[in-house]
Image: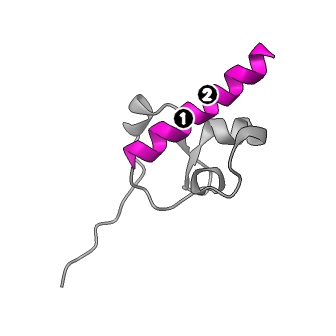
Amino acid sequence: MIKKRKRNFQDSWKDRFPWVSQDEDGLMICSHCRRFPDFANKSGALFKGTSYLKIDLSYLMMRQMNIVLQVVIILIE
């Protein structure tokens, strides 16, 4: 039987993805999504918070670029 490894939030993730953080319930969230909810996918796991504590680099990088682009557009207008 394979024992499943317990995953924990890694503070080192913040070095590479400063917008990823942990909320008061221990869930991983996108802090930019929470700060700018008008631009966020409110049904997304990183907006709601997820206990699936594993970094999916492609998804997180795409999400960060999308949030930043939307905020820049608003600031320019």
Q: Does residue 41 lie above or below 16 as drawn? A: below
Judged left or right of residue 48, residue 4 is left
Instruction: From the image, tell me which residue sits under label 1.
Output: 64
Label 1 Cα neighbours within 10 Å, binned few <14 / some 14-19 / many ≥20:
some
Q: Which quadrant of the figure contains the C terminus?
A: top right
Q: Nearer the viewer, residue 66 or 29?
A: 66
| Distance in Å between CA atoms under marks 2 and 1 | 6 Å
Q: Which residue is drawn at 40% across and 38% down?
A: 13
Q: Residue at x 73, y 39 (%)?
A: 39
Instruction: Give amino acid for label 2.
Output: Val
Q: Which residue is drawn at 54% across and 40% down?
A: 63
| Magenta span of residues | 56-77
Q: Does the magenta stretch include residue 76?
A: yes
Q: Are marks 2 and 1 in contact (CB under 8 Å)?
A: yes
Label 2 Cα neighbours within 10 Å, binned few <14 / some 14-19 / many ≥20:
few
Return the residue found at the far top: 76
Instruction: Give amino acid for label 1.
Output: Gln
Judged left or right of residue 35, residue 12 is left
SS state under label 2: helix
Question: Residue 68's mark?
Answer: 2
